[in-house]
Image (cartoon, helix red, strand yellow):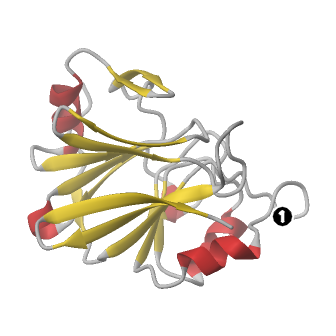
Amino acid sequence: MTAQVPVEPVSARRIAVLADCHIHPGGGPAFDPAVFAALAGVDLIVTLGDMGDSAGLDQLAAIAPVIGVRGADDSDDARTAPQLRALGLGPAGVVGCVFDATAAGLATGSDPFAPAPGWLDAARQLFGPETRVLLHASTHRPEVAEIDGWLVVNPGSAVLPAEGSVRGFALLTVDGAKVTVHSATVD
């Protein structure tokens, strides 16, 4: 089993979570201006992989600081170099971040999230005992679920949604010891 990743303290209270955008300026999809408008006012942008070239991260960084985890379609960028990330939200606990929950041994399927046997112990081993939120991606389909007392969130894609899904991302709001999430659509 992989050792616990270090917990990174985060003071942000409005956190946008994006994934699966596959931005490749000049050779692939691009962010629609509506994405930038929908992100206005966030304190932090967390990306969960498959964001594409660093130019896309640079565009997001003009709105708010960007950190994340690496997916299969990501350029080398220090902001998204780790495979796993644990974000400490003070009294609200820890948020675990991973691109592919199945590859990390946390799920038997990701669309929808199907917990693997012993997934809670595995998640606590990876992200720490204070973790109560798992962010994962790789499906292009949004999902927000409460599983075994944890909030499990897949933001979908703000650029290339799965068939039958809408373009969007997840928005986490931290208020004291409470984290709430809602799916934000891009019009």
Query: Which residue is rendered at x = 71% and y = 36% of the image?
Result: 163
Residue 134, horizontal then vertical, whole percent: 31, 44
Q: Horizontally, is 162 left or right of 4 in the view?
A: right
Figure quadrant of the N terminus? top left
Q: How many marks?
A: 1
Query: Which residue is rendered at x = 25% and y = 77% of the image?
Result: 11
Figure quadrant of the C terminus? bottom right
- The crowding category of the residue bearing disc 1, from other C-alpha atoms within 10 Å (few below 14, some 14 to 19, many at least 20), is some
In this rendered view, identify the residue nearer to me: 114 or 120: 114
In this rendered view, identify the residue nearer to me: 13 or 104: 13
Residue 155, horizontal then vertical, whole percent: 50, 50
Residue 106, horizontal then vertical, whole percent: 32, 27
Seen in the picture, residue 158 relative to 13 is either above or below; the reply is above
State which quadrant residue 8 falls in: bottom left
Q: Horizontally, is 155 left or right of 84 in the view?
A: right
- SS at mark 1 in the image: loop
Q: Name the residue tied to disc 1.
A: 25
Query: Which residue is rendered at x = 45% and y = 25% of the image?
Result: 103
Seen in the picture, residue 101 relative to 21 is either above or below; the reply is above
Seen in the picture, residue 51 relative to 4 is either above or below; the reply is below
Seen in the picture, residue 40 relative to 77 is either above or below; the reply is below
Q: Horizontally, is 171 left or right of 187 in the view?
A: left
Amino acid type, residue under disc 1 in the picture: Pro
Q: Horizontally, is 87 left or right of 113 in the view?
A: left
Residue 133, horizontal then vertical, whole percent: 26, 48
